[in-house]
Image: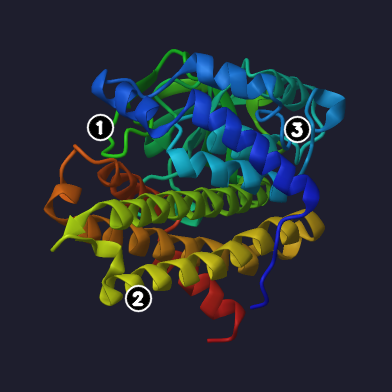
Amino acid sequence: MRKLVKTEEETLLAEAARVFLDAKAPVQHLRAMRDAGRTRDANLWAEMADMGWAGILVPEDHGGVDMGHAAAGVLACEIGKTLAASPFLSTAVIAATALRQVAETRANEALEGIAQGALTYGIAVQESRKFDPESAKMPAVADGNGFRLSGGKTFVVDGSHSDRLLVLARTEQGPTLLDIPSSREGVNRAALAMVDSRDAAHVEFNDVAVSGDEVVGAAGQGLDILAPALRAGQAALAAEQLGLATGAVDMTVGYLKERKQFGVPIGGFQALQHRAAKMWCEIEVTSSAVLNAGRVLDADPEDAALAVSVAKARSTETAVLAVREGVQMHGGIGMTDEYDIGLYMKRARVSAEWLGDYGYHARIVARARGF
């Protein structure tokens, strides 16, 4: 794979994001939220929205800036470097991409709410321990011009505090995507205690009434509408993992330069230099895969599955490698909460599972290449 580099516009966007996140959401911000038992900072998200991040994929006609998936990846990468907690992936990327697939007044109004930072979404797709939207079975039974929804969804990221839920259910017509308020009677949300301090929930639907107007697109078209949104989310999550890996490596290299043994910095030991060099090489290759995924999504979204899965699989491996090596090079103290590298390790483990683990995406790549 040839090395891809950011455009001048992407570089400026990354620099602006870096300045903002270093000031408003450094790693210490996540640590403070974690210590206080919080998973959301509404003020931080409002500031992100003011900067246009919430509308990064929303058309300009609906109040967004519509900079495209490559730009969304640039922001996600910078978010990953400081582990900033926000509904960026679930709302600004996945929900926005799904809603713009349909030309409906209700969807357009929701896009405007997303761009303004006034509306957040949880993505209620997963029903088992592993990500597999094609096997979703939660039933939505016809009731007049709408449905009655019963069943459960797990690992609904940003589901504890979201204003609305995008729910994949199975109707007589087939998989159907529903857009309903989180406060609807019969919707019960239980926050999950995530090790990485990311907001997630288990959601139970107890005979929830859904009107026909709350169907996104048409009944039976759920996977067709959701597929490009999930690919967008996977590409942005890969970018976040790349940022996470970069942040972990930068932290580790800084520690190698400071920590001394036998009177010299341990970064001078050749064995550790070789391991650090390997991490740098992996990040360089992964950065090309991530940039490529965003650009393919912008140019040819219907044919982006391979590029996205390559990026998600590679970024998962790279992030896990970076945090594993980082913890080991920090020594025993790396396993404690005293050093931030442990927070990166926890986020890497959760991100590896969300929206498909390495095996899920490796299978997509293998099928695409005829294996």
Spatial CA distance of label 3 from label 1 is 31 Å
**Disc 3 element:** loop
Tag 3: residue type? Val
Task: Indicate left or right for 190 with 20 as reference.
Answer: left
Q: Which residue is mark 2?
A: 274
Position in image of residue 36 (x %, y %): 26, 18
At x 60%, y 60%, the residue is: 290
Foreground label between 2 and 1:
2
Q: In which quadrant of the rendered image does the N terminus lie?
A: bottom right
- Cα gap from disc 2 to disc 3, whole angstroms: 44 Å
Q: Reply above or below: 191 against 70.
A: above
Residue type indicated by callout 1: Ala
User: How far separated are the C-alphas under marks 2 and 1?
Assistant: 37 Å
Q: Which residue is mark 1?
A: 193
Which residue position is annotated with label 3? 58
Label 3 vs 1, first from the N-terminus = 3
- Label drawn at residue 350: none
Label 1 environment density (alpha carbons within 10 Å; few <14, some 14–19, many ≥20): few
Mark 2 vs 3, N-terminal side: 3
**Residue 243 horizontal/vertical position (percent):** 50, 50
Q: Kindly identify the residue that appears in the image at 32 percent across and 33 percent down.
A: 197
Farthest residue toward the bottom?
A: 371
**Tag 2: Cα neighbours inside 10 Å, few (<14), some, or many (≥20)?**
few
Residue lying at the far front of the rendered structure:
263
Left or right: residue 292 compared with residue 84:
right
Quadrant of res 292: bottom right
Q: Residue at x 29, y 58 (%)?
A: 256
Tags 3 and 1 in contact by the CB under 8 Å rule?
A: no
Q: Quadrant of residue 85?
A: top left
